[in-house]
Amino acid sequence: MIVRLFQRVPTGIPELDEVIEGGLPKAGLFLVAGTPGSGKTAFSARFLYEGVIKGDRGIYVSFAEGRDAFFSETARNGLDFAKADEAGMFLYMDLLTVKNEGIPAVTQSIVDAVLDFKASRLVIDSFSAMAQAVPQLIEARSILHTILGKIIRQAECTTLLISEVPMGTSRLGLGIEEFVADGVLKFTQKEIDGRVIRNLIIHKLRGTKIGRREHMFTLDGGFRMLSPFDSSHANNGHSYPVIKNTASHSSTGIKSLDTVLGGGLRRGSHILLEVGEDVSSPSLMSFLSPIISNTVKSGDQVICIPVNGMYPEELQESLRKSIPDGLASVQIFDITGKGGPNTVDLGGATVLQPFDMFWKTARKLRKPENRLLSIIGFDALEAKYAKDLPAMQGLIIETIAKVRNAGDIMISIARPFSSTLRELASASDVHLRLVQYDGVLCLLGVKPRTDYYGVSLPDKGAHAQIELIQVS
């Protein structure tokens, strides 16, 4: 029987299917390799469950985990394999007690089970454990090439072969699986500043044009892949819902960020947002938009000095799309000298003059019943007043003190190379870092310390929210 490779089997991970032409080639053998705890089992379970909910029977063969443990762990992530088992759509083969002399018979029993059960999807966990019971490497190659390679394909059963990557090596399993397999998916995990980052790398996939080879994912709540950040989604007429403030905190307009910050932006506080060099101004603006939107829609005022490289009119245009009726509550300073409608010229020979103008405007805008949110791009101030850096550093401390005394909120934006970064960090109540990693926009807390969070933009619904997805 001829199997056409362009027929696709969805993995259950939409973000992955999007870059591999809709899914894995049907009836192929695919190596799922990685170190212990890297996400191989979570991915493979998701693949099987995707088949179950679409009417495909699936088999999970385990040489490493008992049936009850598998059912319990996958149920925590919303995969009800027990129900699928009762419905006759899923079969769990527990082969924990296999002895050396039983491998040929066990291998045949797997093939028989696929044919008898009419399975469309198969996971073997793991080939590394299975091969340990085989005396010679050549016999393991024979199992792969002859039995699993040919017979499973004849049954038109798409198969995932889990293989352990030894710690500290680049070899995939025994070093033979990758040559027999139609595709190789490698799962990695590494630490950056003591924080775990997980990646799926597509080493090869026969008959497939691969869009992107490396993808960040999380195991928080089950296997989930993080999409590259597309700022055009958020800056194209998106209207964010209002999140109510509390007596002590103003909401960021992002529920998950409020949770990370312990309730939102505490009044009378200074927040440093350190922005990576590879984060573009549109991406930064996408992140700030719900914060500004929620502030304005809650009846408060915003003062903003755009970051270096962003013109006031660009900021106005972006805000006009998200808060078309609220621009009167946003005062934008022009530090470029270019000028523009509805902006305040923040020029001056020395850095004292713009700070003086800033506070005159703040006193004018602030009312007893309102709060004031100040967003200051210190990289822009540094670029314009490079000769006045010592004076600026003193003004930073003074400005933050005034904000705290007034019970207002100040968000300082600086790049890693900013000369004022140290002063801003030492005087911050909260220090966040916005970076780009493998195309994914990520947020992490320096003070207080947090894990990485992927920033996910809403792609459906005019009133959907930005979401922070914990990478763990």
Image: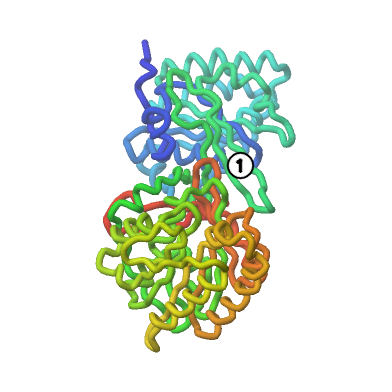
Name which residue lies at 46% across and 65% down: 305
Name which residue lies at 55% across and 33% down: 201
Residue 330 located left or right of residue 355: left
Quarter of the figure with residue 350: bottom right
Q: In which quarter of the image is the N terminus?
A: top left
Q: Closest to the observer: 222 or 366? A: 366
Most extreme residue toward the top is: 1
Q: Closest to the observer: 16 or 152? A: 16
Q: Closest to the observer: 435 or 110? A: 435
Residue that carries the numbered disc 1 in the rendered image: 38
Quarter of the figure with residue 392: bottom right
Which amino acid type corresponds to the residue marked 1 in the rendered image?
Answer: Ser
Answer few, some or many: residues within 10 Å of disc 1's Cα (few below 14, many 20 plus, some between 14 and 19).
many
What x and y, as percent, mark residue 287?
44, 57
What x and y, as percent, mark residue 43?
50, 39
Which SS class for mark 1? loop
What x and y, as percent, mark residue 142?
61, 13
What x and y, as percent, mark residue 228?
45, 43
Name which residue lies at 29% across and 58% down: 321
Colour mapping used in the image = rainbow
Question: Compared to 362, does 464 lie above or below?
Answer: above
Residue 182 located left or right of residue 446: left
Name which residue lies at 70% across and 17% down: 137
Question: Compared to 111, does 429 lie above or below?
Answer: below
Quarter of the figure with residue 242: bottom left
| Residue 103 seen in the current view | yes
